[in-house]
Amino acid sequence: MKNYIISCNPYDPDNPYDPNNPDVIMYNSKVTSIKLNDDSTMDVTTDSASKPHKFSHVISTLPLPVLRMIDLTEAKLSPMQSNALRELTYGPSTKVGMQFKTAWWTKIKDLDIVGGQSYTDRPIRTIVYPSFGDVQKGKTTTLIASYCWTDDADRLGTTMGKDDKILRERVLGDLAAIHNLEIDFLRDQLIGFHAWSWSHDPLTMGAFAFFGPAKYENLYTSLNTFAADGHLHFAGEAISVRHAWVEGALDSAWRAVAEMLTDPRNPWGDKLEKFYENWGINPEWVNTAIGKDQLPVLEDGKFDRQDDLILKHMVLTYPDLFKTSAKA
């Protein structure tokens, strides 16, 4: 397995995803409402345009708490989907980054730390040492001095954005105790620091999905099917079983596209085989044989539709849709 670093900044207007369509991404625009029209098109209203944008389909990858803040009254969500946006839980998380004059955790002989993490029961909980760049020579001098989840993040997060001195001294004190250093040494080494709480960020309203008991059975399941009569689809790490990971976000994007192509009312059914050929099988949505844990093998980009759990899920959720298709 190889690791790759993406050198292009996807948020840089000079490096859009599609160089042939530089206006495909709108910057500094917040969606305020999503609406299904009588002609089965979707209106997406933003705070930066005088008129809504029209689409045939919308895939939302917003964190669920943020999506709930958008006006969805005319998006035809089911009652269970509306409940899911309200009830599915997101967990808190905080990070504190600190830049020092030197990579003291590497250069001090008694420490000699290169990469990896340290764990503690102190308030900062987790320390992440840099592992990319010329770390062996100690040229990377920035440290994730604290990484917290759940209650630890809630408590440490209350100090962020209010009194930086309290937070700074707490983190430096814990770093000094854990590494057997004098706090005055770290105070002198410190160049700057930045703290972040995802629970206090209006663009996330939580770090990642953190579902409680019984949340998967109905609430989670309801978001794994479309709304707005098949024109609004949900994706994002919360709409997968792999929460808090990029893998979950990619899995959910795969499912949302496959859902669109599987809908018999859409004109893209002939592209489904090409989709599987290009992007493979999502283990979350393919049935395996009884007593076996391996996925079915694709032959020429095809697999038995009896193994397609997206199709089965849609048939169970919207049986009339497929009965109509069969008659047609």
Image (cartoon, grey):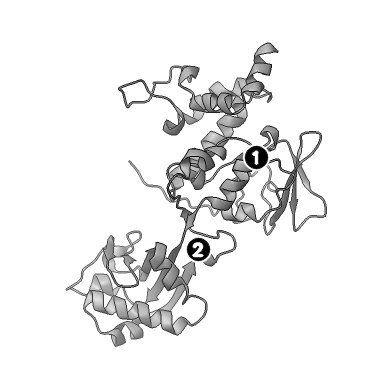
Image coordinates of residue 302 in percent, x first then y, are: 48, 18
Image coordinates of residue 20 in percent, x first then y, are: 67, 42
**Tag 1: Cα neighbours inside 10 Å, few (<14), some, or many (≥20)?**
some
Q: Tell me the residue that label 1 is attached to.
A: 78
Is any atom of residue 80 visible in this view? Answer: yes
Q: Residue at x 51, y 42 (%)?
A: 220
Q: Nearer the viewer, residue 310 or 189?
A: 310
Image-based side of 168 in relation to 138, left or right? right
Q: Quadrant of the N terminus?
A: top left
Q: Earlier in the sequence, mark 2 or mark 1?
A: 1
Label 1's element? loop
Report the label total.
2
Image-based side of 180 in relation to 187, left or right? left
Q: Is residue 157 above or below residue 163?
A: above
Looking at the image, the residue that sits furthest to the bottom is: 184
Q: Tell me the residue that label 2 is attached to.
A: 198
Image coordinates of residue 17 in percent, x first then y, are: 60, 46
Label 2's element? helix
Image coordinates of residue 272 in percent, x first then y, are: 57, 24
Is any atom of residue 62 visible in this view? Answer: no
Q: Residue 101: which quarter of the image? A: bottom left
Q: Specify the amino acid type for callout 2.
A: Trp
Image-based side of 304 in relation to 61, left or right? left
**Tag 2: Cα neighbours inside 10 Å, few (<14), some, or many (≥20)?**
many
Q: Specify the amino acid type for callout 1.
A: Ser
Q: Is residue 246 above or below residue 30?
A: above
- The Cα–Cα distance between marks 2 and 1, rounded to whole angstroms, is 28 Å
